[in-house]
Amino acid sequence: MSNTAAIIALQLVIIILLCEPRERRQKTVRVLSAIFFVGIIVRYAAPAVIGFLVETFEPVVEKIGWPYFMCALVGFGYIVALCVAWRRDAKENKAIRSGSQEAFDKRVEEYVRDHKYSRERALAVTTSIRDGK
């Protein structure tokens, strides 16, 4: 980054911070710092990671072809997402069973919003989770 680009970036940060109310400046500094570090990581680490991935997966792609490789990649991503969702659900169920009113209310709202349950049915289902039935 040239000196001029660094000065422009710092001036933009100062302008952004001056536009923010005093109460939100600390949060804004954290967000801007996170953006800065992500940019540094993308600038310096991403080429190495992409080169490693290309060298690693190229023989697999040559052997099985792009369509099967993409299917395998999507399947792996689906399995990871399924495991994360299962763990999240188990954690929320544990919180509901331990008596957390916040977790209980959150689950009821999810059932009403996402599954289109009536409020009574959502309460009944969440109560059965709480009671361990």
Image (cartoon, grey):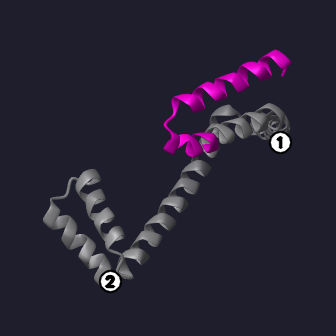
Magenta region's main secondary structure? helix
Of residues 22 and 82, which is closer to you in this image? Answer: 22
Identify which residue is drawn at 31% across, 76% down.
Answer: 129
Q: Amino acid at mark 1?
A: Thr
Q: Earlier in the sequence, mark 1 or mark 2?
A: 1
Q: Is residue 66 left or right of residue 119?
A: right
Disc 1 marks which residue?
56
Residue 22 in percent (x, y) is at 52, 40
Q: Quadrant of residue 56?
A: top right
SS for callout 1: helix
SS for callout 2: loop
Q: Is residue 13 left or right of residue 93?
A: right
Q: Is residue 23 magenta?
A: yes
Mark 1–mark 2 distance (CA, rounded to whole Å): 47 Å
Disc 2 marks which residue?
132
Q: Quadrant of residue 1?
A: top right
Quarter holding the C terminus is bottom left
Q: Is residue 11 left or right of residue 91?
A: right
Residue 107 in percent (x, y) is at 32, 64
Identify which residue is drawn at 26% across, 64% down.
Answer: 108
Residue 106 appears in the rendering:
yes
Q: Amino acid at mark 2?
A: Gly
Residue 90 in percent (x, y) is at 45, 71
**Magenta region:** 1-30
Residue 133 appears in the rendering:
no
Q: Is residue 65 magenta?
A: no
Q: Quadrant of residue 6?
A: top right
* Mark nearer the viewer, 1 or 2: 2
Residue count near mark 2 (Cα–Cα under 10 Å), binned few <14, some 14–19, many ≥20? few
Identify which residue is drawn at 64% across, 37% down.
Answer: 32
